[in-house]
Each structure stands twice: as C-alpha cells, then as structure tokens.
Amino acid sequence: MDRLNGSARLMIVSDLDLTMVDHDDQENISLLRFNALWESCYRDDSLLVFSTGRSPTIYKQLRKEKPLLTPDITIMSVGTEIAYGESMVRDDGWEKYLNYKWDRGVVLEETSKFHELVPQSETEQRPHKVSFFIEKSKASAVMKALSEHLEKRGLDVKIIFSSGTALDVLPKGAGKGQALAYLLKKFRIDGKMPVNTLVCGDSGNDAELLGVPEVYGVMVSNAQEELLQWYEENANNNPNIIHATERCAAGIIQAIGYFGLGPNVPPRDIRDFQTCKVDIFSPGHQVVKFYLFYERWRRAEVEISEFYMQNLRLVFDCMEISKESKYRVWVDRVSSAQIGSDVWLVKFDKWELSVYSLQVNEEWGFVWSMLLILQCLSGAAMLSNHCFTEFKGHGTGWIHMDAYSSDLAGGFRTRRSNYMDSIVYQLARQDSHLSPPHPQSTSLLP
Ligand SMILES: [Mg+2]
C-alpha cells in the first residue's frame, strides 16, 4: 500500500476466476496481454488489486497454475481477508471490524439445519466466511429462511449466492464492496486517493464492487446471469459501468480504453516494434518489449538477419539456443530507480514456460529475479560496451545484468550470467528518439 509515494494514477480491482483468469483459454493469451500492458504502462504509478472469493490456500494454488501478476493488495475469501504486498501482510484491523455481531459457531449451528446446503472444502471455511454449495433452484428460498434464523439468533450477516452454485455466509460488514470501500477510506485518510478506480467482475459476488460509488466498472462479456440481472435492476442507467464485448482480461483492457483511463494497447498486440516507439523513456516498457521480442524469437515467429547472427557468433559462442513453439515469457513486479542522468537500476521477475520447465513441473515455469542497469545511450557511450558495437546512434543498453533463479517461495537458489538475454536485446532494440525520463519512474526500489 505504501509502494507509491502519491495517489495511484489507476487502481484496478479485479475478480480472478473468469474475470482476470479465463479458464477456457489454455494459452492464457488475454492474461498475458494484460500483464504486458500493466508492466509496460501502469506498474510504476498504479495499483493492482485482486478481489477473489478464493481462500488464501486456493488463491496461492491459482498463482502457481496461471501467469498472474503480483498484486499490490489481495482481497480474499469474498472480502473477509485483506493482505498487502508480495509477502501478503494481513490487515488485522479489518478482521477485528468484522467480529461485530458475528459468531461462527452460531452460523454453523443454524446452517446445519438446511440439508440443501453442502459444505465446501475445509480450506474454504474461514474465520469470517462459511461456504456451501447449493442447487440454483433452491438458493433463493434457503437464503431467505437462513437469514431469518440468524437474525433471530442476534447475528448481522450477509448471504451471497454466486456462480450459480456457491453460497457464502459472511458478517454484514464484509464482502468485496465493503472491503474496497474500506481501502478507499484508508487511501482518502492518507491523502492517496487513486485518480481513477476500475472494478472488474463476472459473477454475483462482484455486484458489490460495481455498487461502490465513484468507480468505473466492467462486467466482462462472459458475465453470469446473476450479475447481469443485478445490473438491470440496480445500475442500468449508470454510464460508468459497461458490459464488455470481450471475455475476461480482454474485457478489462477494453474497459480501460472505453473509459479513457490510460493506454490500452498491450505491447503483445504490436507485431512490429518499430511502430512501438514511446515518447518518454520507460524502463518497464523497455523490459516488456525486449522479452516479447525474445519470446517471438524463441518461438521462431520472427526472422533475425544472418548478418547479425554472424556478427554475434564472432563475439559469443553460445548462440545455439533451441527454438520451441510453446515458449512463453512474462515479467512481473518491474520497478526502477533512476541512479544517474541517463541510467536506471531495474528490478523484476521473469517467468518462463519452456519445454524444459514443463518436464520439471506442471506449474507456470521458472521464475528468475532480475537486476539490471539500463542506460539511455548516445552513440559514443554505446561504443564503450562491446555488446553494442554494431549499433550507432541513440538507443538503450543493458549494461549489467544479474539473474537469480528463485523457487516459488522466493528463496534464491542459483545465479547465472544472462548474456543471452543481452544479445537478443540488441536484436530487439529499435528505439532511436528517446525523450527525457518519465518523472514518475523513480523511487520505487527500497
Ligand atoms: Mg469470478
């Protein structure tokens, strides 16, 4: 929450299942497009919030299975748990607040009287959330009766039916919308209210997000009937909410453009990087663009002239990297600090899905923690580094890079030099007219 010194330019608050993550998209194309857009254009001055019905256990499982970015804030268990940053520091104040007129034991006692309610797995039962499955046709009657039972026992609860099958009992003050309102209040007190907030959802428990005042909202094209019905009854004339024509993360990208909240062309959509010039120097943009080129080269989707390859072979003898059609790479947590007039220290995580990583595990490849020094170079400076002797004029150089292999828990295991990335970067480098640095691209490193 304190990563930014001032107000976020954009705060995206998104549900995960079938909103950010499309479980029908085995290649995760929409998600990878969103990731590239976020790291390239938003990470340095905006906030990403995931708001999911998942408990911490199955949220962490999803992060192993899908190429999900690291959010700044994670709201889990249908708005009953809030955690901050990569290390997921819990907001104890929020959980204390939820104790008001809540007694989990009483909820268990009363719900056990309804045979229609089938308890969800133990991992989904949380201190302030009791969760069941129920047949859709029986949900309405059970919700009404259960609500009366719990009221008579002195509790103040909220019962949410979602995804046509899930029923959650929460404290009245909980829920995705209440959790977001709580966060916005904290931002307001700190003087860091986001300039714009975009909420994104697909099912019943996301309706509360769309009901928060003064936010933009998107229901992705695949939104479920219960959410569309809520919209018809409650928000039909709200111009700040749209039903996207695109599925999942592609619908979020569409909404960013529709509401004019910032750039919405993912670098992944740009096939010719010569047309992908930016007016301001952005380390995030440079890193994303390079790895997209790298991925296309590994997938044999781009040609590299034999002239360059021959020159590079004279310098390096390690050019025989295997091409593989399924190779993917994406970057996460790009942060940078300007350490000289034209030099940046850049830190990020690089994830790779390759044949080799698939042989080792079924999860989303290997993660490398990267540290590099990036320089916005003029012609003379470029000649000082032999990696760049083939290039004249202005450009960007990676003048030093360290890479650390990291396990999913974040523990460093091995270190390697990353010449190969550096070489391919030369081939990808296309920028030639760079303006002075972005004033907000500093101070994000600890
Ligand atoms: Mg969902």
Image (cartoon, rainbow, N blue to C red):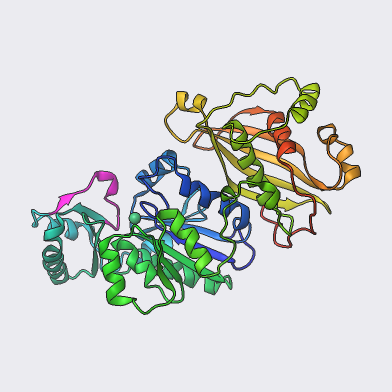
336 lies above or below 107: above
Is residue 428 or residue 113 the one in the foreground?
428
Task: Name the chief secondary structure element in magenta.
Answer: loop
Q: Residue at x 79, y 55 (%)?
A: 434
Is residue 354 or residue 247 the one in the foreground?
247
206 lies above or below 424: below
416 lies above or below 90: above
Q: Which residues are magenta?
A: 117-129
Pinpoint residue 363: horizontal percent, then vertical percent. 43, 33
Indicate the quadrant where residue 123 lies.
top left
Pinpoint residue 303: horizontal percent, then vertical percent. 66, 33
Query: Is residue 147 shown left or right of residue 269?
Result: left
Q: Quadrant of the N terminus?
A: bottom right
Query: Is residue 346 shown left or right of residue 178?
Result: right
Q: Is residue 407 visible?
A: yes
Q: How many marks?
A: 0
Q: Residue furthest bottom?
A: 237
Is residue 258 or residue 302 the one in the foreground?
302
Q: Residue at x 46, y 49 (%)?
A: 30
Q: Is residue 1 visible?
A: no
Q: Residue furthest right?
A: 380
Residue 194: within the magenta?
no
Indicate the quadrant where residue 298 lies.
top right
Residue 119: within the magenta?
yes
Query: Is residue 352 shown left or right of residue 126?
Result: right
Pinpoint residue 28: horizontal percent, then vertical percent. 45, 44
Is residue 139 or residue 261 the one in the foreground?
261
Query: Is residue 16 shown left or right of residue 260?
Result: left
Indicate the quadrant where residue 176 lies.
bottom left
Pinpoint residue 271: horizontal percent, then vertical percent. 61, 46
Ligand 1, by image quadrant, is bottom left
